[in-house]
Each structure stands twice: as structure tokens, then as C-alpha cells.
Amino acid sequence: MQRTTGIAALVALTTLAAGFPAYAAERPPRQITATIETPSLFDDEAGGDADADDPAIWINPADKGRSLVIGTAKNGGLRVYDLRGREIQSIATPEGGRFNNVDVLSGFKLGKKRVDIAVVTDRGLDKLRIYKIEANGLTDITSADAPLLFSKDEAEVEEQATGYGIAVYDRYAVVSRRHSTRLGIFRLEEKNGKVTYRTTDTLDLPREFRLPNGERWTPCLEPGEDPQVEGMVVDAEAGVLYAAQEDVALWRINLAGGTFSSIPRVVERVREFGQPATYDPETEECTVEYLNNFGGRITADVEGATIYPTGKRSGYLIVSSQGDSRFFVYDRRTNKPLTIFSVTDGRTVDGVQHSDGAAVTAVALPGYPKGLLVLHDGENTPNEDRTSTNFKFVDWRSLGLPS
């Protein structure tokens, strides 16, 4: 049974009046390099329309050296890599499918066993796909009758306002809806040896905001679209969801079981927040005029979010500032801004530009004794004069943060 949270109606009223944080003058971002990259993916017919987007890291409990990185490739399905960045498995989408985001859940009870699973948003079909993870690769265990996430019927699926971003915790998946402000929580359940899901709560983030000068502002988007969320991460120990509403802000929302349990609060707004802008239908881009200081430091879109733990509640929250190819780091407990970094060209691996997804682990792995950070690179080079993307592996030590 779906439950629409009672706080939903209060979100707009509360967040419109929220304060606007001030930030000290920025230091130049720390420049680091990646150690390894995965093979190039090409978003054309010859490349199978593969477009890298979002990574997740699976830690092999029996042999950490055989841990895996799982990445979505949209129409190109899933790619599975070893810790050297070598592709060990390629999984095609179902007919009409388009894999957008992925997250990993450990210890899911399937029958009498506990298994680790990868949960993927299929934005093409408005469904979740669930895969059992083992050292030699992934196996699809999605129930054949898994329901639509947000759409009423297949005709609505065709409009592609479908499942988009994802973050998992306990037995739940938080999923965002494309071209919408809606978030849903879905409980993952076993059914005849497979996995299905059902909605337990929904929440709509604001689409309109009142500024300190009394004016109302909405993000500049293509007509008919609302400001969507993609990048998300759940801090399970704290019971907190971080949701990146691309053209607006990074939000912090408390969770209780399978429900949203607090009014969303802003961690940081994008730089474009509150700025007048005009949409150009020919270029499908917005021209922004920077006339005030209502926004934050992140250059839209605010994207991939991930957490590096140093203790039960301590650690770091990392977020992609996609518009200027930087990454912002916050204190996990307080959300206080700590540092900024960018990934630049190294001797053998190019840098990271316009990054979507991010994933990090603090587990010591071969070659990464303090942990591994995996980032999507939206402009991989060399690119053979084709649209090329991939994933970069970064040694956590290069960030220079206490671990």
C-alpha cells in the first residue's frame, strides 16, 4: 500500500522561507589525478549506444581483490569491471530498456540465504532491475511481474517521466522520477525466488521558490519539465537521504523505515539558484544572468553523491558540481563545507569532466589501501572524434583528507 507522506504539503512552505547560507572565499580546488580508467564507451551505433553514467562498488567479502565496479551505460546496459578497470561482463537491457543509475545492497535475504544485489533504474521501462552479485559477475533475479515505478500504464511510460536516480538502504530503494520533483521509496521483496518491490512512500520536492527579495523563482528548464533529482545517497547510520535536485540544490531528508520523516533541508544551492534565465529552444540551453548572490557554489547540475565513512557517523559527503567539473566535499555529520577538488589529466589517464555518478568505499583494496573513489567521466579522451565516456578510479589518499 502506497503512503504519501504527511510532510509533502509542508515542503514548499518551509523551504521557500529557508535561509541562504554564506560561504567564505573559495580556495583553488585541489587537483588530483586518476590511477586507472575503464575502456571507452561510445554513444553511437558502432558502440552499441553505450553512454557511461553511474557507478557502484561491490566489496567481495571473501576476497577483496575480486571486488567489482558496476556501471550503467544507458542503452548499452550494464558493464562490470574488476579493480584494474578491465571489463569482465556486459549485460544488455531488456527490449526498450535504458539503464540509468545503479546502487549496491548487501545482505538482502533471498530464501534462506543472504545475498548482495545491484539495483538498477530502467528508465526506458519505468522499472527496477535486480541482479545478484557474485565474484564472477551478475545474474538477473528480477521478478517477471515487477510493477511500474511511477507510470499508470504503458502509454505513460512512453512519455519517459520514469524511474531515474536511485539510492538503496536496508530493504528499500529511493527512486527519483525523471522530469519531475517526485521521490518514491520502494520496499524490495522476495517472490518465488526472485525480487519485486512495492511503493511505501512518496515525496514531492518544490518546483517554485520564494527569494529573499520577495520574488518567486523557478529553474529554467525545457517547457513541461520540472526540476528533477538524479544523484542520491543514503547515510543509513544517520537515517538521512541526500538528494541532488539538479538545477536547484542538494537536499537532506530524514528517513524512518520506508518513509520520509522530515521536511527537506538545503545543504547547498546551485550557483544558478534565483538567477533570471531564458530557455532557447534551438540550442535547448538556458542563458543565465548572474544578477544576485542567492545561490551557492555548485555549478548546475548538482549530481552524483556518495559517502566516505571514517566512523559510524563521521566521514565525508562528496558531490559532483557537473557544470564546472569540480567536486565538493562536506563533513558527513555537520554538512559543513570542507574542500573542493578536480580530477585533471595525468600521465596515462585523462581527467574527469561533467561527471554524473560517483561511488566511494573506505574498505582497503589492492592498490587502494585507504579506499577507492570511482567517478563517471562525461568527456573521455582520446575519443576518436566520437562521443566517449567511461569511469575513472581514484586513490582516496590523493584527496589529502584524514581517513
Image (spheres, rainbow, N blue to C red):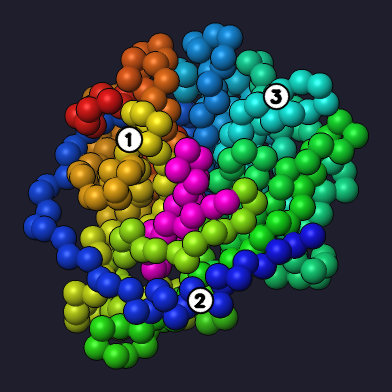
Nearest-to-viewer mark from 2 and 1? 2
Question: Could you say which disc has been placed on residue 115 in the image?
Answer: 3
Q: Earlier in the sequence, mark 2 or mark 3?
A: 2
* Residue receiving disc 1: 315
Q: Earlier in the sequence, mark 2 or mark 1?
A: 2
Distance in Å between CA atoms under marks 3 and 1: 27 Å
Nearest-to-viewer mark from 3 and 1? 1
Classified by dominant secondary structure, the portion drawn in magenta counts as strand
Where on the picture, by quarter, is residue 210?
bottom left
Residue at the spot 19% in from the left edge and 74% down from the top edge? 293
* Neighbour tally class for label 1: few under 14, some 14-19, many 20 plus, Cα within 10 Å: many
Residue 401 can be seen in this image: yes
* Neighbour tally class for label 3: few under 14, some 14-19, many 20 plus, Cα within 10 Å: some
Residue at the spot 24% in from the left edge and 75% down from the top edge? 294
Residue 302: x %, y % from top left: 38, 57
Q: Which residues are magenta?
A: 232-256
Asked if residue 216 is positioned above or below residue 116 in the image, the reply reads below
Name the amino acid, label 1.
Gly
Q: SS class of the residue under badge 3?
A: strand
Q: Quadrant where the C terminus lies?
A: top left
Asked if residue 127 is positioned above or below residue 222 in the image, the reply reads above
* Residue receiving disc 2: 10
**In this rendering, position of residue 126 left or right of residue 267:** right
Residue 74: x %, y % from top left: 60, 47
Asked if residue 54 is positioned above or below residue 292 in the image, the reply reads above
Question: Could you say which disc has been placed on residue 80 in the image?
Answer: none
Residue 221: x %, y % from top left: 46, 76
Residue 301 can be seen in this image: no
Residue at the spot 38% in from the left edge and 79% down from the top edge? 16
Name the amino acid, label 3.
Val
Name the amino acid, label 2.
Leu
Residue at the spot 42% in from the left edge and 41% down from the top edge? 306
